[in-house]
Amino acid sequence: MNTTSRSPRQNLLARLNLSTPIIQAPMAGVSTPAMAAAVSEAGGLGSLGVGAMNVEGARKAIRETRALTSKRFNINLFCHVPDAADAARERAWLEYLAPEFKKFGAAAPASLNEIYKTFLTDEAMFQMLLEEKPAVVSFHFGLPAQEKIDALRAAGIVLLASATSLREARLIEAAGIDAIVAQGIEAGGHRGLFDAYGEDEGLGTLALVRVLVERTSLPIIAAGGIMDGAGIAAVLALGAQAAQLGTAFVGTQESSADAAYRAALAAAFTAEQPRPTTFTQAISGRTARGFANRLTALGAAAGAPATPGYPMTYDAGKALHAAAKASGNSDYAAQWAGQAVPLARAMPAAELVATLTAELKATLERLSGLKAVLG
């Protein structure tokens, strides 16, 4: 689709009827209908990550959210190109992890499965979206076929897609997507790279937002390292129309994060030397940022074999985590977190939205005062 005539840039908040420029990141496996509904009810845009669900689970989540709110919310899908099965790589990775399984009296799986289906080939999920017509749908890891994009837009659905670079943003713009989620290197969770094996510029949120504001015609949503109202104000000042926060919502009461994950967040907030975040492919097979742990260390160790790719590596990681967790050990878990995790707070999701909005207003007032001083 030719987008050169789409000017001026649309007001995304008005289109979505949001009273605050806050979007809760989808966070597959952590977000819940209760979280998404609470955020939307508070004036932001709640989100559900359904990339790890089958069509029945996704439909159920949508309907449960609708039972809690009449406001708009976002449904996020994974558009990854699946890695080809490689028996030799799988065997080498499972043999490498076998001693870790043994520590907990378990055996490594005999083989690995593609546990998540990509939206690129999931026709049942596509048909379900056309039937349920959620107000907003977003894409991560790439874009679906143009005919799917056109059909979803024709159904009245607002479409968002993640970009980590100007090149990806221009593909999003050309496809007729309504807004771009600019994902900086600071973000927790999976990098939204279209090509998992291509070059990653590693652009930070501020640089990426400013480039996309100046070099594309679409509304920009900033994501990555934003945890408070001052961070939201910073990206708005650069031209973003909204901020997407993920790590900030992991510790909310409505989150499905387990006790160990919540404890890691609390420690990040209170400890003088909190556990760092790191990029790893050892947990899922794709680059993602989370708390450093035993599994990330194994992936970074000298001589570690190549992972079996995404999402097969996740199958191994989940099995190892389950074996360890049964023994009270959480050091193999996928505890995704962004670089600004020391600013994490625990409170209900609606209260967090209200707090962030108040902080944003206070920051803007301070900046207004500074403007007066500078003349």
Image (spheres, rainbow, N blue to C red):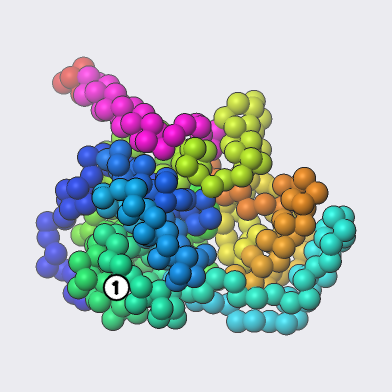
Residue under the point 75% across and 60% down: 320
Q: Main secondary structure of the magenta part?
A: helix
Quarter of the N terminus within the rendering? bottom left
Q: Considering only vertical position in the picture, is 367 above or below 257?
A: above
Q: Amino acid at mark 1?
A: Leu
Residue at image coords 50%, 44%: 255
What residue sits 74% from the left and 50% below the top? 325
Q: Who's the residue at 41% across and 38% down the image?
A: 349
Question: Helix, strand, or loop for circle 1?
Answer: helix
Where residue 14 sits: x, y (%)?
16, 48
- Residue 217 percent across, percent down from the top left: 20, 59
Q: Position of residue 365 (x, y in %)?
A: 24, 23
On screen, 116 above or below 254? below
Q: Is residue 317 above or below residue 293?
A: below
Q: Nearer the viewer, residue 245 or 109?
A: 109
Q: Which residues are magenta?
A: 341-370
Please state if 146 lies on the left or on the right of 342 as rendered.
left
In which quadrant of the rendered view does residue 104 lie? Answer: bottom right
Q: Is residue 347 magenta?
A: yes
Magenta includes 139? no
Q: Mark 1 — residue?
A: 130
- Where is the C terminus found, in terms of image quarters? top left
Can residue 198 be seen by looking at this rendering?
no
